[in-house]
Image (spheres, rainbow, N blue to C red):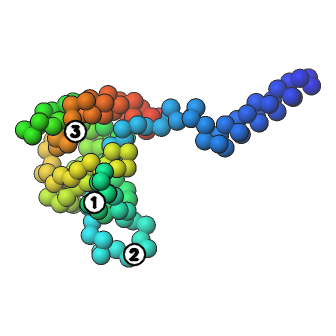
Amino acid sequence: MKWLRQFVWVIGLWWLLMGGTGCALFDRYKPVFNLSLHREVRRDAFAPESSLVQPVYDVMGRNEHFVSRFPIVDSSCFGEAELVRGDNGKWGLRMRLDRKGIGLWRQATGEYGSQTMVILLDGYFCGTMMIPPYDESGYLMLPPLWSELEARRIASHVPSNYRKANR
């Protein structure tokens, strides 16, 4: 009985140490290549201390965009992705929306139609697109912003991100 109590203490201590130090063991449950689409907003439309907007920057840190902190749709709404070749030699993604995503996208196209939306990948700026009119296809077309390798990597993680976000 004494050995069982010691074993439980050791396991509990190990769990606290690994969880408290941010062990990489738990990172496998986090989404990677996490796409999110945010509405671009004017900074002067909100108070300076507002927590509803956040600045995002391009890779070089030159262009600043202010976006709503909460995405319109994100990886929790994308069930699968297909690669689509663009005219500029880059690749876009055709994302299949789930039921929740279809409802959110329908609402966004009605409320924010033809406004600018910012595409973030793991919280970093990728590009912008205009919110197109709503169609009943259940798909969302992201513009060609990535090389073929990048687009394939993003598309390969879409199903696992969907499962992780909706378990």
- Placement of the N terminus among the 4 image quadrants: top right
Q: Are marks 1 and 3 in contact (CB under 8 Å)?
A: no
How many marks overall? 3
CA gap, disc 3 and disc 2: 33 Å
The residue labelled by disc 3 is 146
Please give left or right for residue 87 compared with residue 150 in the image: left
Secondary structure at badge 2 equals loop
Q: Are marks 3 and 2 in contact (CB under 8 Å)?
A: no
Secondary structure at badge 3 equals strand
The residue labelled by disc 1 is 62
Please give left or right for residue 154 compared with residue 25 in the image: left
CA gap, disc 2 and disc 1: 21 Å
The residue labelled by disc 2 is 48
Residue 30 visible to an observer of this rendering: yes
Q: Mark 2 is on which residue type?
A: Pro
CA gap, disc 1 and disc 3: 19 Å
Residue 158, quarter of the rendered image: top left
Q: Mark 3 is on which residue type?
A: Trp
Is 7 in front, or is 23? Answer: 23
Residue 81: image location, x then y, percent? 25, 32
Q: Mark 1 is on which residue type?
A: Arg
Residue 88: image location, x then y, percent? 9, 40
Secondary structure at badge 1 equals loop
Residue 72 visible to an observer of this rendering: no
Question: Who's the residue at 27% across and 34% down the image?
Answer: 150
